[in-house]
Structures are given as structure tokens and as C-alpha cells.
Amino acid sequence: MEIKYLVLYLVAFLNLLLGLFIIKKNRRSKINLYFGSLCIVGCIWTLSMSLLYTLNNLAVLDWIIRLMVVTSTLMFLLYFLFALQYPYPTPVRKPWLIPVLPVILIVLGLLGFLPVEKLYFFNGRLVEQTIFGNYLIFAIYYIVYLFLTFYVLFKKFFASEGIQRLQLKYILISSGVTFAIMTFFSVILPLINGYFTDWFSPIFTLINFFVISHLIFIKNR
């Protein structure tokens, strides 16, 4: 087994511990619930990615790919919900937004049944080939949630003062760097079948989770 896959297993384990720690710290807080759940889903996503390169059953791998799509899109949703809650809840002023969440969950389910990659083995090695049309739907979903999340965070940053403004500043920097790396390695390169660096994304995601956890849940709570 290559060292990078062992790294992914370690990243998954640390994500799980971090998520459980945050939720346990304050089970009644929506902020803790959303961010802790984000870390746990990140654990499942990372574990799925590591299994993708360590198993050799195509039928099982096909379902792992679907699980990765569902968990990654769920991560976007949880990060957006966290942004809506931190450091204070964003008021929902338009009633039509209320049914949006069920629709999003339905979309998540549908995305999981849209194969974004075609898998096969060549000379004993797994080959991933992007299904462009389906992957484009996933990429658009990712971009929309990325835009919404940073729109909410920037709006709160300019409206905040003191420690909240400072925390939001570091969250924006940490998240911005992480999402830039993830966009390149896990969204842009796969569009041209470049999956060889995809395993870097979970590592930087974990770093971002730890930075935010230190700022919000460990240092100041």
C-alpha cells in the first residue's frame, strides 16, 4: 500500500475525532452541529477516496464513487449552513427560501446516481475517466455553493467588529486557500482526467477544519 493512502486513512481518522469533539463540546449549538457534521462527512469522503485506490472490485468501486459524490456535495451544504449560523444566525427574510433545503437534499440524492467517472483497470492499475456532462453538473453545483458560502461570510465580515471580525478574517483566508487548492486538484484537473493529485484535497481540507476549530471551538470557547 502506498504511503499516500495511509495518509488518507490518517486524515479520515483525524476528521472523525475532530467532528465528534466539536459536537460533544456543545450539542445544542447549531454552529457546533453543522461544523462537527462537516468534519464527520469529510471523514467519510476521505475514507471513500482511500478505498477507491485500495480495492479492485469494479462493482464496489462504482458505489464508492457515488458515495464520494453524495458526501462531497453534502459537505458544501454543511459548510454553507455553518456560514449562515456563524457568528450569528443569518435572518431568512424571504419565505420561498424555506423549502430550498428539501430540494437540495433531493438534488444530493440525484447527484449520487449520476456517475461522474468511468472506471476500469489497465495493466493492474485503476483508470478514472471523467463523464463530462455529469461532472459538469457536479462542478456547477460546487461553484454555486462556493459563491453562496463566501458571499455570506464576506457580508458578515464587513458587518462585524472586534474578535468576530478577526475570526471571520482568518476563516476567509483559510477557507479561501483550501477551496482554491480543492478547485484546482478536485474540480478542474478531473475535467481533463487529471486524478493523480486528487488525494491532496482531503489533506488541505483537514488543515482548514483544524484552523477554524482552533479559532472558534478551542481558543475562544
Image (tube, rainbow, N blue to C red):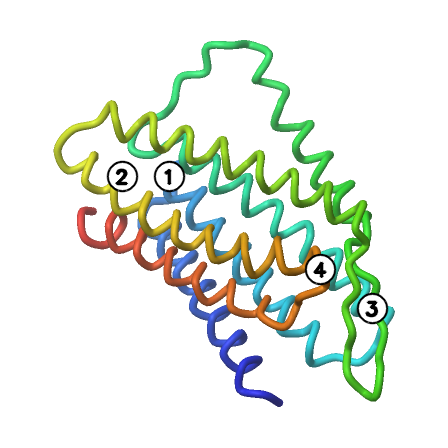
Image vertical order of residue 120 relative to residue 84, above or below: below
- Dot 1 and dot 3 residues touching (CB under 8 Å): no
- Ranked by sequence position, the earlier of labels 4 and 1 is 1
> Residue at the spot x=73%, y=44% of the render?
136
Give the secondary structure at mark 3.
strand
Q: In this view, does 156 lie to the left or right of 140?
A: left
Disc 2 or 3, which lies upstream in sequence?
A: 3
Name the residue carrying label 4: 192
Q: Residue 31's mark?
A: 1
Amino acid type, label 3: Leu
In three-dimensional space, the C-alpha distance between marks 4 and 1, rounded to whole angstroms, equals 37 Å
Q: Are marks 2 and 3 in contact (CB under 8 Å)?
A: no
> Foreground mark, 1 or 3?
3
Q: Percent x, y for residue 28?
A: 37, 38
**Residue bearing mark 2:** 168
Towards the viewer: 137 or 32: 137
Which tag, 1 or 2, sits closer to the chain's start?
1
* The image quarter in which residue 141 lies: top right
Q: For the residue labelled by badge 2, is the local secondary structure a helix, a strand or a loop? A: helix
Residue 13 position within the rendered picture, expressed as x and y whole percent measured from the top left: 48, 71
Q: What element carries label 4?
A: loop
Query: Residue at (81%, 54%) from the top-left corner?
Result: 131
Circle 4: residue type = Ile
